[in-house]
C-alpha cells in the first residue's frame, strides 16, 4: 500500500512539475507586457485549417476572416506548394492602436531553454484599419508569412533552430512572397520599385530592411509570376527547403544564373516604366517644407488648412512617434501643438493616428488616444485653452471635419469592428449616420446638411442577405457619395469607377477635390457635384498620400511618399486639367480581365451549344443566358 501511495505521489509530483514548466513558458510568452490599458479576453473560431482569435466586439470580423481564409486556402497552398502541419493562429485586433498593446510577439526571437529559438507557434497578428480591402490584404500577408516560415524553418523548435543555424533567408525573400500572395502587383510596390530601380544603378537588395526589402521582394516574385508563370513560385520555395539558398533555388528553377536573372528583373521594370516617366511628371522635392526621417518608416497622415488659409496643420509620424505641427503659410514659421506616440521593437507602428480638423481659425481638434481611450482634444494654436472629450464607444477615429460654424463635426470612426460615419457636437452629443457592413470613410461637409464621403458600398439584390456577406464579396473599389442629412437621410452616388476614390475635400459649394488611383498612381481629381463630372488635375509619377486645398488662399498642400520617407509640399492651386494614360500595371490588369471574360463566355457558349444539341427547344433559355455577357 505504501509502495502504491509512493508511486502516486511521485507521479503527481512529476505531473505538477511538467504543468509548471508549460505554465512558465506561457507566462514568459504572454505575461511580459508592453503598456496595456485593457485586458484582452480572447475567444476564437476554428475551422479545418485555421484558428482566428478575437476579443470584445470583434467577433464579426473574426468570423469573416476565418471564412475568407478558408476560401483562399487552396490558392495559397497551391501557390506555396505546402500545407502547414499545425493550424496558424491569427489574432484580430479592433484597431492599430490596440495592436500596440499586444505582448504575443515580445519574445519571438529570444532564446529559451537549451538555447533553442521559439519558432514553434504559427502566430499572426492583424489589426482592422477601417478599410476592408486593406483588411483582406493584411490577413493574407500575415497568414502567408507564418506558413512560409514554417515551410522553410520547420514545424518544431529543433527543426527551426537547426534550419536557422544553417541559413536564415533574407527579408526580401520571405516578406516579399508573403506580400505578393496578399497583394499581387500592387500600387505601392509599383510606385516604390519604379523609382528605386531608376535611382539605384546597382541595387543592393540585401542591404534593404523591413518594408523596403518586402516591396523589392514582392516585385521579384511578381516578375517571376509574370515572366515564367505562377507555378514556378512553389518550385522555387520547395527547392529552398532543400538547398537552403534562395539564389540557387531561383537560378536552378528558371534556368539562368542568378546575376543574369537579377539583370533581367531590373530590365523588365525599367522597360515597362519608360512610358510612365514620359507621360507623368516628376515631383520636385527640393522645395518641400517638411519630411519624415530617413531612418524609420514614417508618414504624414493628415493635412488641414485653417478656414482663413493663413495656417496649415499637419501630422508627421516617424515610426510611431508623432507631432502635430502648425505652420504659418506666409512666413514658414512652425510650432508643435502636440506630440506623443512611441516606437515598439518588432511591432508595426500606428501610422494613421492622430487625425485633425480646424474648429475655427484659432482652434484645432485632434483625435488621438489617452490611456487606451479614444480622445478628442480641442487646442488653441496659441496654447491658451485646452479641452478634451473621451469617446468610450469609439475604437479609433479615422478622419474628422467641422462645418463652417464650427459647432458640429462629422467623423469616420471604427466601432464594433466597422467603420461608419457619425456627427458630433462640441458638447460630445452625437448621432450615427451609417450602420452597415460597408466602409464609410473621410467624410467632409459641403454645407451644413450635405456630406461627401468615400465608400465601397454596392447595390445588392433583394435575395442577398447583408448579414451573410463574406469578405471576398465586399468590393475593393471605393466611390464618392453625397449624403443629405435632414429628417431622413438620402444618399446619391457621385462617381462610378472600378478604382479607389478617397479623401474628398471641399473646394467650393459645388466642387470637391479627391484622390483617385484610376490611372494606377494616386493623383488629384476635381469633381463637380451637380454635374458629377470628374477631371484629373495632377499627373505625378509618385502617389499622393494625403492633401488639403484652401480656396480662400488658392493653396494646396500634399504629401508624397519617397521610399520610407514622405515629404510635404505647399503650392499655389491652379486646378488645370491634366491627362495621363494608365500605367502598364493597369493596362495589363485590364487585358487579363478582358481575356478572363472572353474565356468564360466561350466556355459558357460551348456548354450551351452542347445542351442545345441535346434539346433543340432550349434556344430561348440560351439567349437569356448569353445576352447579359455581351
Image (tube, rainbow, N blue to C red):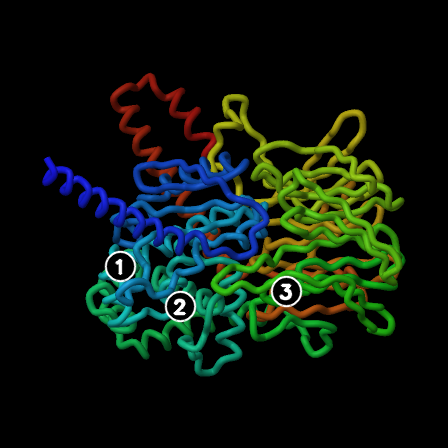
Q: For the residue labelled by badge 3, is the local secondary structure a helix, a strand or a loop?
A: strand
Which residue has dot 1 on it? 157
**Residue 172 marker:** 2
Q: Position of residue 542 (x, y in %)?
A: 60, 66
Q: Nearer the viewer, residue 408 or 590?
A: 408
Count neighbours of disc 1 (C-alpha within 10 A) and say few if under 14, some if 14 to 19, many if 20 or more. some
Furthest residue in direction bottom, as rendered: 201
- Residue at point 35% right, 38% down? 602
Label 1 to label 2: alpha-carbon separation: 23 Å
Residue farthest to the front? 2
* Residue 89 at x, y percent in the picture: 37, 46
| Residue at the image position 78 percent from the left and 41 percent from the top | 530
Percent from the top left, x then y, of residue 361?
Answer: 88, 56
Residue at 39% of width from left, 54% of height from top? 181
Q: Which mark is residue 321?
A: 3
Q: Are marks 1 and 2 in contact (CB under 8 Å)?
A: no
Amino acid at each position: 500500500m505504501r509502495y502504491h501511495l509512493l508511486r502516486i505521489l511521485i507521479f503527481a509530483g512529476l505531473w505538477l512539475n511538467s504543468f509548471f514548466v508549460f505554465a512558465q513558458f506561457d507566462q514568459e510568452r504572454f505575461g511580459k507586457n508592453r503598456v496595456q490599458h485593457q485586458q484582452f479576453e480572447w475567444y476564437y473560431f476554428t475551422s479545418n485549417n485555421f484558428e482566428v482569435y478575437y476579443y470584445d466586439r470583434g467577433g464579426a470580423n473574426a468570423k469573416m476572416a476565418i471564412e475568407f481564409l478558408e476560401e483562399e486556402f487552396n490558392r495559397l497552398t497551391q501557390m506555396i506548394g505546402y500545407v502547414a502541419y499545425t493550424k496558424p493562429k491569427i489574432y484580430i485586433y479592433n484597431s492599430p492602436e490596440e495592436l500596440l498593446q499586444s505582448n504575443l510577439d515580445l519574445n519571438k526571437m529570444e532564446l529559451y531553454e537549451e538555447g533553442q529559438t521559439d519558432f514553434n507557434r504559427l502566430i499572426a497578428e492583424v489589426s482592422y484599419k477601417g478599410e476592408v480591402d486593406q483588411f483582406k490584404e493584411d490577413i493574407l500577408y500575415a497568414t502567408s508569412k507564418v506558413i512560409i516560415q514554417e515551410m522553410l524553418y520547420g514545424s518544431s523548435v529543433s527543426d527551426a533552430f537547426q534550419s536557422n543555424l544553417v541559413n536564415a533567408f533574407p527579408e526580401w525573400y520571405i516578406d516579399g512572397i508573403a506580400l505578393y500572395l496578399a497583394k499581387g502587383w500592387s500600387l505601392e510596390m509599383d510606385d516604390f520599385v519604379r523609382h528605386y530601380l531608376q535611382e539605384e544603378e546597382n541595387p543592393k537588395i540585401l542591404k534593404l530592411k523591413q518594408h523596403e526589402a518586402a516591396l523589392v521582394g514582392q516585385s521579384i516574385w511578381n516578375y517571376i509570376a509574370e515572366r515564367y508563370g505562377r507555378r514556378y513560385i512553389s518550385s522555387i520555395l520547395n527547392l529552398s527547403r532543400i538547398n537552403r539558398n534562395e539564389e540557387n533555388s531561383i537560378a536552378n528553377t528558371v534556368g539562368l544564373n542568378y546575376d543574369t536573372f537579377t539583370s533581367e528583373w531590373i530590365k523588365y521594370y525599367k522597360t515597362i516604366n519608360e512610358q510612365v516617366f514620359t507621360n507623368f511628371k516628376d515631383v520636385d522635392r527640393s522645395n518641400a517644407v517638411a519630411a519624415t526621417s530617413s531612418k524609420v518608416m514614417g508618414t504624414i497622415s493628415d493635412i488641414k488648412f485653417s478656414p482663413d488659409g493663413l495656417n496649415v496643420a499637419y501630422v508627421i509620424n516617424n515610426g510611431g512617434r508623432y507631432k502635430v505641427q502648425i505652420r504659418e503659410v506666409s512666413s514658414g514659421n512652425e510650432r508643435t501643438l502636440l506630440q506623443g506616440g512611441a516606437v515598439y521593437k518588432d511591432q508595426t507602428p500606428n501610422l494613421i493616428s492622430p487625425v485633425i480638423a480646424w474648429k475655427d481659425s484659432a482652434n484645432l481638434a485632434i483625435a488621438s488616444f489617452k490611456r487606451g481611450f479614444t480622445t478628442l482634444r480641442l487646442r488653441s494654436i496659441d496654447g491658451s485653452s485646452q479641452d478634451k472629450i473621451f469617446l468610450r464607444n469609439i475604437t479609433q477615429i479615422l478622419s474628422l471635419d467641422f462645418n463652417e460654424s464650427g459647432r458640429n463635426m462629422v467623423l469616420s470612426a471604427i466601432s464594433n469592428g466597422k467603420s461608419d460615419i457619425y456627427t458630433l457636437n462640441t458638447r460630445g452629443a452625437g448621432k450615427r449616420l451609417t450602420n452597415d457592413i460597408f466602409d464609410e470613410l473621410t467624410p467632409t461637409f459641403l454645407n451644413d446638411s450635405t456630406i461627401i464621403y468615400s465608400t465601397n458600398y454596392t447595390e445588392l439584390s433583394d435575395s442577398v442577405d447583408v448579414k451573410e456577406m463574406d469578405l471576398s464579396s465586399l468590393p475593393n473599389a471605393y466611390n464618392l457619395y453625397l449624403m443629405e442629412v435632414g429628417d431622413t437621410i438620402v444618399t446619391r452616388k457621385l462617381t462610378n469607377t472600378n478604382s479607389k476614390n478617397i479623401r474628398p475635400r471641399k473646394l467650393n459649394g459645388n466642387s470637391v477635390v479627391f484622390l483617385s488611383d484610376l490611372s494606377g498612381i494616386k493623383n488629384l481629381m476635381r469633381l463637380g457635384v451637380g454635374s458629377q463630372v470628374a477631371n484629373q488635375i495632377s499627373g505625378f509619377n509618385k502617389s499622393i498620400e494625403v492633401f488639403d486645398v484652401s480656396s480662400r488662399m488658392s493653396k494646396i498642400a500634399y504629401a508624397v511618399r519617397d521610399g520610407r520617407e514622405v515629404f510635404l509640399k505647399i503650392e499655389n492651386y491652379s486646378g488645370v486639367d491634366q491627362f495621363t494614360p494608365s500605367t502598364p500595371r493597369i493596362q495589363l490588369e485590364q487585358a487579363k480581365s478582358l481575356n478572363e471574360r472572353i474565356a468564360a463566355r466561350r466556355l459558357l457558349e460551348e456548354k450551351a451549344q452542347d445542351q442545345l444539341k441535346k434539346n433543340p427547344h432550349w434556344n430561348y433559355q440560351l439567349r437569356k443566358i448569353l445576352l447579359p455577357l455581351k
